Amino acid sequence: MIKDQITNLKNEAIGQVLEANDLKTLEEIRSKFLGRSGKINELTKEIPKLKPEDRGSIGKLINETKQTIEEVLSQSQEKLGGKKEEWFDLTLPGKKPEIGHLHLVTQTINEITDIFAKIGFKRVRYPEVEWDWYAFGGLNFPENHPARDEWETYFIANLNSPKYGRGLLTPHTSSGQLREMEAQKPPLRMLNIAKCYRRQSDISHATMFYQFEGLVVDEGINITHLKGTLDYFFKQFFGPERKARIRPYHFQFTEPSFEVDVSCSGCLGTGKTASGEICRVCKEGWLEIGGAGMVHPNVLRNGGIDPEKYTGFAFGWGVERVLMMKYGIGDIRLLFEGDLRFLNQF
Ligand code: FA5
């Protein structure tokens, strides 16, 4: 019985609100239904007369009805242009909008791109999801090379090409070498900066990281061109007093191959501090930065280039590693955690 009364009251109120054409009528409806001696309060006074077990549910129903009528009223009020003006204190200090900036890795990628652009290197992009041929096979890696091991490289399930082998996530930017050779004829001056993926994670290794790869192929290119390019980059990126050093090493796709070191900023390559103590940063004057070498003749052949006529050099380093060296950042994971307290410093 009382439930029917409540439903009828709700329908009556909504009907009247929908028919109202002005704010004054809405105010009258509000006081008629929701006012102190309005119809809702009349009903509320009936609650104590109910059986104790019914009081809770009827009280709840009356409250819901009140809310519904309030919502319908305020919607109509807004439609009729009766939105209340909000009070605004002009003397309050304003809120400064937050202005974002590029992530340190992106800033560094842009800086590296600009440095190499000045000596004619063109930035390129090649697929992140690659074939074994471009990442390994065509770069002279034998079938059983450990880099192909599932523990190092992410292979993609059910992605196989009869011609190019298994699908994978690029483990290094060297996969761009053959793509570049296929894309155009020498002279080549490529800068491939891309995401790389490896099953590694610790203080200096991330599962996803960036590498930048330089490739130069032309007639008469030799090791002095490589050394000069490395020297130029280090001076531009780390500072005019820095120097490059190359040491013999082994990579499948370069011959001869080198590890590249940059002279330490702390001791300027001497390995000793001003007071004659051993430099704590490098211990020997040099910091290892990554790989380089003269492009292997088999790789040139696989890219359709005659190794009797052309020679080339290549280098490939981690973007995060070089920026960590430059800014003295001790843990690569800081770069990917998105912590603004860290990122806002750059
Ligand atoms: C290579 O990847 C070769 N492709 C480099 C190369 C290119 C040699 C051209 C010769 C000619 P390596 O695996 O050493 O080499 O990696 C090169 C650099 O990538 C490392 O020195 C390091 O700076 C960076 N790097 C490698 N793995 C990771 C990782 N998991 N996280 C962050 N940086 C990494």
Image (spheres, rainbow, N blue to C red):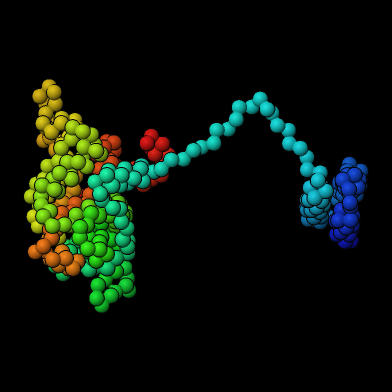
What residue is at 25 percent from the left and 43 percent from the top?
A: 322
Asked which quadrant contains residue 326, the reply is top left
What residue is at 22 percent from the left and 42 percent from the top?
A: 233
| Residue 24 visible from this viewpoint | yes
What residue is at 91 percent from the left and 47 percent from the top?
A: 25
Asked which quadrant contains residue 261, the reply is top left
Asked which quadrant contains residue 255, the reply is bottom left
Residue 269, position in %: x, y?
Answer: 13, 33
What residue is at 8 percent from the left and 55 percent from the top?
A: 256
Please name whichever residue, 121 or 337, is drawn nearer the observer in this view of the structure. 121
- Dividing the image into 4 quarters, which one contains the C terminus? top left
Which residue appears farthest toward the bottom when viewing the image?
162
| In this picture, residue 63 sits left or right of residue 226 | right
* 29 over 181 or under it: above or below: above
| Residue 48 visible from this viewpoint | no
Residue 95, position in %: x, y?
Answer: 58, 32
* 29 over 188 or under it: above or below: above
Residue 225, position in %: x, y?
Answer: 13, 48
